[in-house]
Image (cartoon, grey):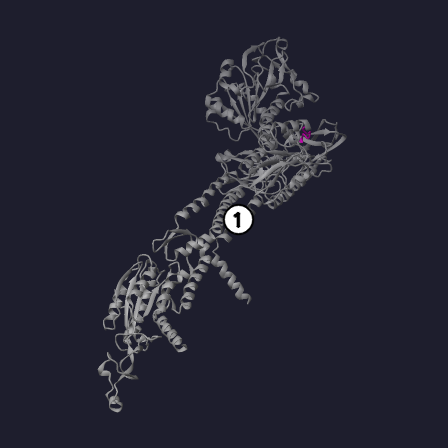
Amino acid sequence: MLLGSDSRDRLGSLRLRARGVVEGAMGGQHRNPHRGASVEFAEYKEYAPGDEIRHIDWRAWGRVDRYFVKQFEDETNYRAYLLLDTSGSMGFSLEERQTKLAAASTLLAAISWILLAQGDAPGLLCFDERPGNYLPPSSKRSQFEEICRLAEGATATGRTSVETALSRIAERVQARSLVCLFSDFLEQGDDLLRLAKVLRRKGHEVALFHLVDPAELELPFEGLTLFEGLEGEEELLAEPDDLREEYARLFAAHLARIEQGARASDLEYQRVSTNDDGIAAVRAFVAARQRRKGGR
Amino acid sequence: MGFLQPLLLLGLLGVAVPIAVHLVNRKKAVRRAFPAIWLLAASKRQTAPASKLKQRLLLAARILTFLALPLAFAQPFLSGEMGGASSRVDRLPSSVVIVLDDSASMSWGRDGSAERFAAAVDAAASSISDLRSWDEVSLIVASSPPQLLTGDLSSSHGTVRTALEDYMPRFGGGDLAGALEQAKAMHASSKLPQHRTIVLTDRTQSQWAAPALAEALRGAGVVELPELVEGEGSGNLTVESLTVQPADDGAAGRYRFEAQVRSSGNTGAAETEVRLFDGTTPLGVSKVALPASGRATAVFQLKVEGNELHDIRAEVSEQVGMTADNSRHLAFQPGRALRVLLVNGDARSVTYADELFFLEHALSAGDGASGALEAVSVGAESLAGQPLDGFDLVVLANLARLSKDDHRRLLAFVQAGHGLLTTVGNNAVPEELNAAFGTLLPRPFRSVKVLCEAADPDANLKAVRISSIDRGHPVFRIFAAPGGQTISSALVFRYLTLEPAATEGAKTLASFSDGAPALVERSEGAGRVAMLATTVDLEWNDLAIRTAYLPLMRRLASYLARQSSERRVDAEVGAEQVIDAAALTPERLTVVAPSGGRSVLEGPEGRYAFRPAEAGLYRVLVSVAGTETAADSLSFAANAPAAESNLSMATPDAVAAMVARSGEGVAGAAAEGGSSSRRDLWPWLLFGALLLVYAESFLQVRRRVWKRLGERLQAARS
């Protein structure tokens, strides 16, 4: 189980609230832009053919002899698509630390738990260079176990293609949803940000969870080293001591580019180190969302 | 360019180590999986030129370090020629052996002080001061035998200087050749490139003319011969010999001491005073006329009481030149009777007809006091079982034969320094005598010559007489005095002729009137053999009833027997003296030096080797059954070697020629320029290697370390 009872307890009071209005198949805590049959009255509307007869306010008809239909502020459940990168680079770890894939699985499990606890429907898509296992969003009770089972069973292999995963989700998602992407974003180019922007423009919320291993920041190796890529890249013979300074500069620039791009596209961005406590990272993510919501 | 330790150049092979390490390291790179490899590749593209340069610099630093260190350890140098005394600074590292001559001739001085030795010590000290710290030095004293004062070659110059200052010269015999051989052996053990032998000697003929010296100089490296004295010494007085004989008047207890004095150079004088001492007690003074470069004999007729051992010393009053030979010691024990073994080859029952009748009486005459002879007679048949120990002289009277065993014993007896007198008679068959006696005879016999019978009325005409004698010889010196011609009155009727071929060393002391030898002597080993060509009784002559018989026989016996005691004076300072105490069977033997020092000796079969270190009387003590007693018969006197008194120096040409024959070297006063010079390179190589190690460390240390260090420094400043 990715999320232990302790972790669940720590997440118990959290409520993931959508920043915007989302559409859902079941009533929830999120406001629905569509008027519907709900307990909370919104306004009257003169009956027109096609309206639900059961929504006619018969008391109003008695007073004014006209048919009005009651409209309510309806509430909907929240669909969330959790995209987990299972490419080879996500399997990296140094010494006793957890892999980036394991750290990402913990994060998505925590978020799934929160969503399910508030009646929302999380789904999961594993991907590398192609979309892999897919679990449609659902708020059923067994959804959490399903998500955990798929995440735990994922192995880090193959190349990365975040764009492919985002394209697949963009095709499937009809209602506005939350799209959480868990990856190390080691792809070159700007396709990721471009597609994320597209999703955002469609009204979806997009959150990027950027997994980073400390060794990627520090390059803490000594002596002549033959570096092997985890996604089929060519080997590289180098003296880490010679590269460290330049590498650190380039890596920092890469991180900054992802983060700044995300911010500029109104994407939520959370960088998570494999050293970090995953639950704390989720709490920080939720707190940041609430701050942004409050600020809006 | 040369190397002091060329073998260490093998270390240059170590240059393969950094290259191999460099290559192996590339193959042994650690494989690591890493996700952001495209970022690493981009980094490498940026840093590749600097990294490659660093790697090449590292490899170069390591290779150069591995080259520089073995080169430095091999101590390279550039050699060249330097002139003048200033070459000291750049002289090649040398093994220097100082050979210090402390033979007796080095005690020469104008006022009796040892000027030559003092000059040699000063020169040695100066040479030590001139050494550089890496030069190795040792000091050998050219005594006999040579003595290594400071152990092996050492760069501890202070030790050598201290040994030089503390050394007390022996002024005995010298062995310059032996010392040079030792110096060569020491040079051979040194790894330094230059070998120098500094010989501090007065270059006297006695040392420099030694045949072994030329060979010893060969291979001794650069030989330096500093000039110790300007020219030869102005002269020298030497007491060449000091002997003692019974006094001319034959009185008991009276002795005649003769001191022969020699003058070298222009030191002669009309009245040269010679003093005689018994220990420190003056006995007498004699003035002799000593010509320049001549000899004179000072004679002292003295009565010496008792039978104790005396240290008799003759000394010239004027201390001139070499001091060591201005006096001479003699171990003298007057009371000891000479013991003579008489072997009777023709014993008779009628007393006066016995072969030894007259001889026994002649030798036993006197009151038995000091200077007496003790004669013991045995028959010829008893000779085989008769021990010879304790006898000074054996007289073989008219023996017809001699066993091989007796011949061997008698030969050893004589060679040990005793005397043997052979007389003939009716038993004599020349061929048998020659075969049996062999080397015990001064000359071989030829035949019996019969001139007449004793009863022949014309015997006066037919017989021969002893007409020719060596009047300077100790045996016949007394017959030079008035009345001495009585020896010629004796008639000899029969005698043995000798082979005409002269035997080497044989000396005829007396001859018959027909020219045939009557008395012949020869040295055999340390002793003497003599033969009388006629009888010692009345069978072949009437000498026994003449007045000359008694003094002749006694002096002849004393002369031959004294040889065993006189030999003691032959000991020379520095020369090994063998003390034969086998007859005394001591448990140990102690020699007391003139200065009081005691030496306990051990030796095989009662023979003890001892080397006197100073002139004077050496008393010998033997321990038998736990009791130590004086063995006066073994005591001896040691004097400066006679050869050392010859102060004439080798000519400069002879010295130069000998040094030239040695193959290399510089003769003369202090190395007169022309010595090779040297520029050391190894300090620079070591310094360079050190810099390379620093550079290698600097390049090798991780940038992260430098970064952290910089951060800490910055933090400390803030």
Between A210 and B370, the one nearer to me in the picture: A210
Vertical position of residue B228 compared to residue A211: above or below: above
Q: Secondary structure at mark 1?
A: helix
- Residue designated by label 1: B692
The span picked out in magenta is B645-651
Between B511 and B141, the one nearer to me in the picture: B141
Q: Quadrant of residue A152?
A: bottom left
Was residue B646 drawn as part of the magenta stretch in this picture? yes
Please state if B12 lies on the left or on the right of A233 as rendered.
right
The disc labelled 1 sits on which kind of residue?
A: Leu
**Chain ID of residue with mark 1:** B
Give coordinates of residue A228: x percent, y percent: 36, 53
Please state if B173 lies on the left or on the right of A198 as rendered.
right
Give coordinates of residue B404: x percent, y percent: 46, 21
Give coordinates of residue B235: x percent, y percent: 73, 31
Please state if B78 lies on the left or on the right of B230 as rendered.
left
Residue beneath the point at 63% across and 9% down: B461
- The reply to whether residue B651 is visible in this rendering is no
Give coordinates of residue A215: x percent, y percent: 40, 60
